[in-house]
Image (cartoon, helix red, strand yellow):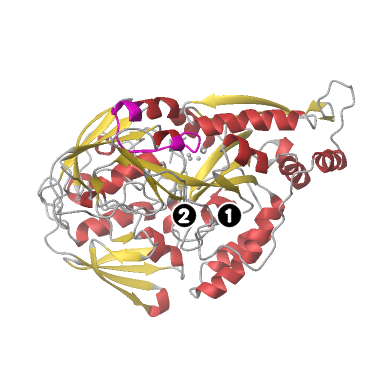
Amino acid sequence: MPDYITSLLHIYHKGGIDMKLRKSALMMLSVFMALAIFLSACSGSKSTSTESKPAGKPQKGGDLVVGSIGEPTLFNSLYSTDDASTDIENMLYSFLTKTDEKLNVKLSLAENIKELDGGLAYDVKIKKGVKFHDGKELTADDVVFTYSVPLSKDYKGERGSTYEMLKSVEKKGDYEVLFKLKYKDGNFYNNALDSTAILPKHILGNVPIADLEENEFNRKKPIGSGPFKFKEWKQGQYIKLEANNDYFAGRPYLDTVTYKVIPDANAAVAQLQAGDINFFNVPATDYKTAEKFNNLKVVTDLALSYVYIGWNEKNELFKDKKVRQALTTALDRESIVSQVLDGDGKVAYIPESPLSWNYPKDIEVPKFAYNEKKAKQMLAEAGWKDTNGDGILDKDGKKFSFTLKTNQGNKVREDIAVVVQEQLKKIGIEVKTQIVEWSALVEQMNPPNWDFDAMVMGWSLSTFPDQYDIFHSSQIKKGLNYVWYKNAEADKLMKDAKSISDRKQYSKEYEQIYQKIAEDQPYTFLYYPNNHMAMPENLEGFKYHPKRELYNIEKWWLAK
C-alpha cells in the first residue's frame, strides 16, 4: 500500500500496499501492539510459529537473496511510504529508537531519552562515535537537520502528520538534542523516533528542502549509518547491499543482502523453489507448497496488517454512508477468507489488529454481516433501482458501475477483485476490475490524483495504535486519507486521543472511534492475514516481527 506504515503507516504491498506512507508508495501501513494471537500456525514439519533457535556460534559470510513483488521508490524515510523502500531504509540507516518483536520501544542510536514538561519535550542523547558510510561522524547536527525537514514550509512529503505535534528541534550539545512539542502526542515517542532515518547533513544540508525529495541521493547514492551500505540499484531487477564493517552495533554476519524485485507472487514462488531467492513472504495460497521445498523452512505468525476495499468518497457513488454499508453487506467475507485464502485469515471489522493492546474487547462494533437481500433493500432505500431491466441498478440516469483497482502481482488481491465483481453483480452492481503496476497504482491513488473508484489494498500498521493519519479529514490532501473520509465527531475524538498517555483511557476513547469508523464504512474491512516467512533452513538468528520482515537482519547468519 496507498501498504505500509508511517506517518506511521506503510502501505502493505508486499506479498501482494504502511501502512508505513509517498508519492509512489502506499502504504501498506500501521497500527499496533501486542498480544492476542488468534490465528493458528500452519502445520507441517518444516513450519514453526515462533522463531529459529540459534544453534552454535554465529558465522560470517554469505548472501541472503530477498524476494519482493514491490520495487522501492526511494531511500529516504521522510518521503517513502511503501514497505519495499522501508525494508531497504531499515538496513541503510540508523534510527533513534527501535520497536522490538514484542512491539516495545527500545533505544537504538539514542543512548538516553528523558521526557520533560509532562510530555511536551524530550531530551535525547545519542551515541558517540557513530559513523556514516562515508566515514563522517553522526552528531546532533544530523539529528536536528533530519527532523527540521518536515517542519519546513517547503516540505512536500506525505509524512507530515507524523510530525504535526513537533514544535521545534534544537541542538543542546554535540550529542544531545531537545525536541519540543506543540501538544502531547504518544505518536512522537512511539513512532516519530523509530520511523525517521537519520540523514547526513554534510551531504544534504545545502539541498533546498523543496528539491530534497527528487535529489539523486535518495535513489543513486544513499549514505546512512546503518548495518548495510548501498552498493547498487538496477531498477526492475535488484538492490544490492553490503555489510558495514564500522556499524556501531557490530558488523553484520551476512556479507551481502540482495533485494530482488519480482513481477508477481507466482514468479516469486517459482524462484523460491529454484533457489533464485531464499527469503520471501509467501502468499497464503502457496505456503503449504513452500513448506515442501528443499533447503527451506517456513515461519508463520500473525501479521500486523489488514486488507480492505477502500471506497473513494470523492466519487458520488460512495458518498452515501448507506451505500457503503450496503456494499459491505453484499460481500461474503467469510467465503473470501475460506475460498481465496484457504481459511488462512480472519474476517476484519475495524482498522485495528488483534495484536494491539488497543483492540476493543468489551464492545460490539457494526459488522454488516453478509445478507444479499438486505443489501438490495439498503440500496433501494438509497434510491438505487433497476429502472430499465438491464440488471444494473441506476439512479438519476446514472448506472451503478465502477472500476475496482488493485496491484499487479498480488495473486490474492487479484482473486479477491474477481470475487467482489461476482458478488456485487448479484445485487445489480457492475464492477470492472483493473490490475495496475505497483508504482503506477500508487501514483494514481495519491494526492493530487485520487484516480480510482475503489481499491483492494492493505495497510501494514504502525506499532502505535493511532488512526489519525488515515481517517482524519485533515489528512485528505496532505496525508493518507485517500478515500476522502469525513466525520467531524471522529475527527475530534482522534485529535483528543493524542493527548492521552494512559493506555486504559486511550483504549476507552478509541472504542468510540472504532464504532464510528465501523458504522461509516469508509473501507470494507476484509481480513487479517498471517505472514508465512520462507527462509533458508540454515538461517539462524531470525526473530519474527509482526511488522518488519527483515527485523535485526544484521544479527542473522547462515550456518555452515
For marks 1 and 2, give the CA distance: 10 Å
From the viewer's perspective, tell me whether residue 491 is left or right of residue 22.
Answer: right
Q: Residue 158 or 41: which is nearer the viewer? A: 41
Which residue is at a point 62% across and 25% down the rendered structure image?
Answer: 433
Q: Which mark is residue 179?
A: none
Q: Which mark is residue 472?
A: 1
Which secondary structure lies at badge 2?
Answer: helix
Is residue 276 rendered magenta in the image?
yes
The residue identified by callout 2 is 161
Which residue is at a point 28% across and 35% down the rendered structure image?
Answer: 219
Give the image quarter of residue 427.
top right
Q: Residue 476 or 195: which is nearer the viewer? A: 195
Give the image quarter of residue 487.
bottom right
Outermost residue on the bottom side: it is 117
Kindly tell me whether residue 224 is visible in this rendering: yes
The magenta span reads: 271-288
Which residue is at a point 83% across and 43% down the rendered structure image?
Answer: 374
Which secondary structure lies at badge 1?
Answer: loop
User: How many residues crowd around disc 1 within 10 Å: few (fewer than 14), some, or many (20 or more)?
Assistant: many
Q: Residue 93 or 528: which is nearer the viewer? A: 528
Is residue 221 rendered magenta in the image?
no
The kind of residue on which mark 2 rests is: Ser
Which residue is at a point 62% across and 64% down the rendered structure image?
Answer: 492
Quarter placement of the C terminus: top left
Question: Mark 1–mark 2 contact, CB under 8 Å?
Answer: yes
Residue 322 percent location from the top left of the image: 78, 46
Vertical placement of residue 116 versus 192, above or below = below
